[in-house]
Amino acid sequence: MSNTLIEKVNNRRLIEGPEDRVMCISPLKHPWAMEAFKKFRQNDWYPESIAMGDDVTCYRNKLDDAERRMYDKGLAFLSNLDAFQFENLTTNISVHVTSPEVQMAFSRQAYEEANHVTAYSLMAEAVSSNPLDIYGMYESDPVLAAKNQLVLDQNDELRGEFTPEKFALAIVSNICLEGIYFYSGFFAFYLLAKNGKMLKSADQIKYINRDEEAHLGFFIDMYHCLKQERPEIFTPEFYAKAERMVRSAVELETAWGKHIISGGVLGATDMIVTDRIKWLANQRVERLGWAPLYPGVKNPTPWVEKVSAVNGVEVNFFEGKPTDYQAGGALDMDF
């Protein structure tokens, strides 16, 4: 490898780095991104491989009104959210990234968000004679409309004049999206599955959940990488803004979870929803190196980890050993 190319690799940065357009990914400046890319590929799956016929019968004949309402509302937001995220990744966040291996991981993540949209479409078509009733539910549900708007507003914070702090806050926003905003919806499907209902829908959700946990890890690694490369961003003012963002996400997701269970479905209560979301938030911020935002809150639903298992392998909500954000030492280069 020429000294010029070595220098180009050494000079790479997550954002505001040189635009060398050279797809040299061996050796790597950001090996954590390539690990994410490989993990995304290993999780490959196809929604069409899950036959939804049993759920058609279950939805029509075995769910009561409250369970059917919970299913519909859970599916409505999840289908909206992955569509938002696909657009956010492709037109908003990734355009500011100057590391080719991080761009590769983003491209694979965008594919997976599109794959999730396909899964939600199959679910909507299985249970509804008019899938637009699911996709367009925000038009008749003000709680859903408000939640959608807040997510879109957070995504739009990065648009306009770019600043490194905006990008860092966008990472935190995406940690909220991948690690908090999906989880009242996921819980609704696992609650039905725990009671032997809508099992094929739960299978779709298990795969989506596994993907989102991998995406969450990708953004957490990105956060730590940016903290190392641009430490001047991480001021007390930044942390205050980031904490407000996470707390806002918890409040929003808790309100949504309470809304879709309508005071209680299959033993779920407002307190269970509240504590589960707060517990999840604590797990997320711990991986950022923060103190718990909700000290003492315990997981009220440990059974979810069993129900959410894909082929007998549980989704690991604590996954993510400490990562070495320094690049590898291949070729003895001074990264």
Image (spheres, rainbow, N blue to C red):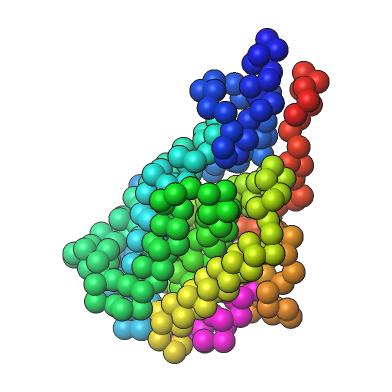
Would residue 275 be counted in the magenta stretch?
yes
Farthest residue to the bottom: give it: 263
Residue 320 position, x and y percent, is 70, 52
Q: In this view, does 15 lie above or below 330?
A: below
Residue 62 in percent (x, y) is at 34, 77
Q: Does the magenta stretch include residue 252?
A: no
Considering the whole magenta stretch, tell me its main secondary structure. Answer: helix
Query: Residue 297, position in %: x, y?
Result: 69, 79
Viewer-nearest residue: 177 or 8? 8
Q: Which residue sits furthest top? A: 2
Task: Report the label total.
Answer: 0
* Quarter of the image that includes the C terminus: top right
Is residue 332 at least partly visible in the picture?
Answer: yes
Q: Is residue 332 left or right of residue 158?
A: right
Identify the image quadrant of the N terminus. top right
Query: Which residue occupies 30% across, 55% down?
Result: 121
* Residue 170 spot, x, y in % from top left: 52, 55
Q: Is 126 in front, or is 316? A: 316
- Classify 273 as above or below 110: below
Q: Residue at x 39, y 61 (%)?
A: 152
Which residues, given as a range, are shown in magenta? 265-280
Identify which residue is drawn at 36% across, 54% down: 83
Determine which quarter of the picture holds residue 8: top right
Q: Which of 54 and 152 is in front in this view?
A: 152
The answer to which image quadrant residue 236 occupies is: bottom right
**261 lies left or right of 220:** left
Residue 178 visible in the shown view: no
Task: Write the residue at 24% across / 76% down.
Answer: 140
Q: Is residue 308 above or below residue 119?
A: below
